[in-house]
Image: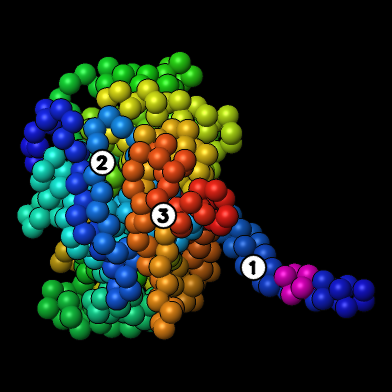
């Protein structure tokens, strides 16, 4: 895949009529949205509404779950990543991901950052890449003298920034963050949020969060997902209720359900 | 209160009861083996006449080393690959179910059956030899390695695999660079225990290696001895000197198996996954 990334403000992702099934049950129905470059897009909604399912569609991580099936289109710089013949491995090399719980490999700090570059056959100066990535993730100053130390000896917040550095080292242009701060304390959370503002200058960021204040603080655009229930079969699936500028979603939502959620009436 | 004490008493007596025979075995082997054990025993083969004292079991030690070594070289890679298939590829398909079922059956099969099987399949055609004995030992080791490695591979957290895939690693890269290294200490433990088990096998070797009183280093075409076979022969012989050598051989084997088991435990305690 060699998408043209020089299109200025053309959307990075265009999602069209996305449905996700796990086995025979519908998990997410009819999602359409656009992700714009160098902006932070938040995905919010109550538990079980399919936020994680949605974000895992952007780098084809869902298909690692047995029985998961995606229909519809996700255009990445105009190219459908679900088209036949597209290798999910190549998609994931362009679109980085940070997970809910920090998940560094049980290797050294250096090895963690170098991992992605190594498997992708990076030819440049690895020391330089590791330093650059750790600097961008605001972790360099804390670990520069102990790069050989096991990543598991770092604190939770440091581990999560290491995971961000590890994702950056592959040189993606999008970073997906699935509740990146939900396992962290408030101070570590603020550091991650500050870091996101820095990263926004070069990357498009999509973040799933169950924390509305966080969405309001960090994001430029917000998608609100909600669970629909079939009265007869009590089957549940997620739909996207509203998508727009974060300030609009939080101050003048057009849908009653969005208003109830952001004003804290349920969730 | 008295129920508590009574059950504690029962449990402790049960433990003591099981430990008594183990302690007696260890004590008796150490006691009876020590007098014959020494440099001569460890470095020499059987004396010209087995009725005489002196000599040792080095031919058995070398036979055991060759056969267990060959069996290890074959069964460890195959066993680990089998386990990787079960965990990462097969999961619940019919082939994986079949492999799992037969591994379980094989771990429970009396080892003499393995000897009989290898005898009819290989010995009748190629004769006795180290490679044939090793084949029997490999058949005994393989299911142990497959099932213990499978358990270790299953313990590798999904989060680590996710991290690897999300960085654009292909499945084989995830397996070789993340899953196997994470599970390595546990896999090593299982492999060591399988080696210890093979080193202590007698029955399958009777029918495949046959045994020899001479030092044999040929891999094929000649019967070869093992520590266990020499212990068996010595213990059955009506001569005091032969029986004394059997005791020393038992002590030697005991120490070898113990070392492997202890090393296995050390690896297990180092495993990052069990923390």
Q: Quadrant of the C terminus of chain A?
A: bottom right
Q: Is residue A117 above or below residue A230?
A: above
Residue A74, image x, y percentages:
18, 51
Q: Nearer the viewer, mark 3 or mark 2?
A: 3
Q: Give the CA separation, mark 2 to mark 1.
A: 69 Å
Residue A9, image x, y percentages:
18, 31
Q: Is residue A84 left or right of residue A164?
A: left
Q: Which range of residues does the magenta coloring cover?
A: B11-16
- Residue under label 3: A255
- Residue under label 1: B22
Q: Give the CA separation, mark 3 to mark 1.
A: 75 Å
Label 2 lies in what chain?
A: A
Neighbour tally class for label 1: few under 14, some 14-19, many 20 plus, Cα within 10 Å: few
Q: Mark 3 or mark 2: which comes first in sequence?
A: 2
Q: Secondary structure at mark 1?
A: helix
Q: Are marks 3 and 1 in contact (CB under 8 Å)?
A: no
Q: Nearer the viewer, residue B242 or B219?
A: B219
Label 2 and label 1 in one chain? no
Q: Quadrant of the N terminus of chain A?
A: top left
Asked if residue B13 is among those painted magenta in the image, a careful observer would answer yes
Q: Which colour style is shown?
A: rainbow
Which quadrant would residue A201 be assigned to in this image? top left
Which quadrant would residue A115 be assigned to in this image? top left
Label 3 and label 2 in one chain? yes
Residue A209, image x, y percentages:
45, 45
Which residue lies at the image location 46% right of the left edge and 56% below the top edge? A256
- Residue under label 2: A35
Q: Secondary structure at mark 3?
A: loop
Q: Nearer the viewer, residue A151 or B236?
A: A151
Q: Are marks 3 and 2 in contact (CB under 8 Å)?
A: no
């Amino acid at each position: 895949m060699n998408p043209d990334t020089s299109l200025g403000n053309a959307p990075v992702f265009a999602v069209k009529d996305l449905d996700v099934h796990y086995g025979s049950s519908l998990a997410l129905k009819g999602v359409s949205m656009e992700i714009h470059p160098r902006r932070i897009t938040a995905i919010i909604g109550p538990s079980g509404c399919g936020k994680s399912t949605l974000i895992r569609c952007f780098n084809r991580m869902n298909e690692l779950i047995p029985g998961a099936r995606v229909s519809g289109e996700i255009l990445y710089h105009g190219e459908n990543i679900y088209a036949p013949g597209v290798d999910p491995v190549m998609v994931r090399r362009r679109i980085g991901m940070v997970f809910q719980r920090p998940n560094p490999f049980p290797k050294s700090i250096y090895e963690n950052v170098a991992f992605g570059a190594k498997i992708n056959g990076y030819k440049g100066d690895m020391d330089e890449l590791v330093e650059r990535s750790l600097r961008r993730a605001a972790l360099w100053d804390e670990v520069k003298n102990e790069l050989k130390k096991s990543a598991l000896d770092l604190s939770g917040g440091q581990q999560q920034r290491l995971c961000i550095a590890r994702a950056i080292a592959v040189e993606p242009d999008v970073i997906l963050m699935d509740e990146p701060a939900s396992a962290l304390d408030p101070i570590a959370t603020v550091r991650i949020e500050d870091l996101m503002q820095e990263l926004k200058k070069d990357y498009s960021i999509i973040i799933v969060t169950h924390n509305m204040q966080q969405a309001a603080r960090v994001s430029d655009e917000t998608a609100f997902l909600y669970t629909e229930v079939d009265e007869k079969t009590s089957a549940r699936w997620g739909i996207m209720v509203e998508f727009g500028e974060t300030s609009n979603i939080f101050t003048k939502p057009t849908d009653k359900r969005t208003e109830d959620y952001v004003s804290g009436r349920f969730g | 209160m008295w129920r508590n004490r009574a059950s504690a008493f029962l449990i402790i007596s049960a433990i003591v009861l099981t430990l008594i025979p183990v302690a007696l075995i260890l004590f008796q082997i150490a006691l009876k083996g020590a007098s014959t054990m020494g440099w001569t025993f460890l470095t020499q083969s059987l004396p010209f006449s087995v009725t005489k004292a002196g000599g040792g079991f080095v031919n058995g030690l070398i036979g055991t080393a060759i056969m267990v070594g060959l069996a290890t070289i074959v069964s460890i890679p195959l066993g680990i690959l089998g386990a990787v298939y079960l965990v990462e590829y097969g999961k619940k398909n019919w082939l994986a179910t079949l492999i799992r079922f037969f591994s379980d059956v094989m771990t429970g099969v009396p080892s003499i059956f393995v000897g009989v099987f290898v005898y009819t399949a290989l010995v009748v055609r190629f004769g006795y030899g180290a490679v044939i004995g090793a084949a029997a030992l490999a058949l005994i080791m393989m299911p142990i390695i497959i099932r213990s490695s499978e358990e270790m591979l299953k313990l590798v957290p999904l989060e680590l695999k996710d991290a690897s895939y999300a960085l654009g690693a292909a499945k084989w890269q995830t397996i070789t660079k993340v899953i196997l290294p994470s599970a390595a200490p546990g896999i090593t433990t299982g492999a060591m225990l399988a080696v210890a088990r093979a080193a202590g096998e007698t029955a399958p070797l009777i029918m495949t290696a046959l045994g020899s009183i001479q030092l044999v280093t040929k891999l094929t075409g000649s019967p070869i001895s093992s520590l266990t076979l020499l212990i068996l022969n010595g213990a059955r012989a009506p001569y005091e000197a032969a029986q004394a050598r059997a005791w020393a051989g038992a002590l030697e084997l005991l120490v070898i198996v113990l070392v492997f088991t202890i090393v296995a435990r050390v690896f297990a305690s180092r495993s990052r996954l069990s923390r």
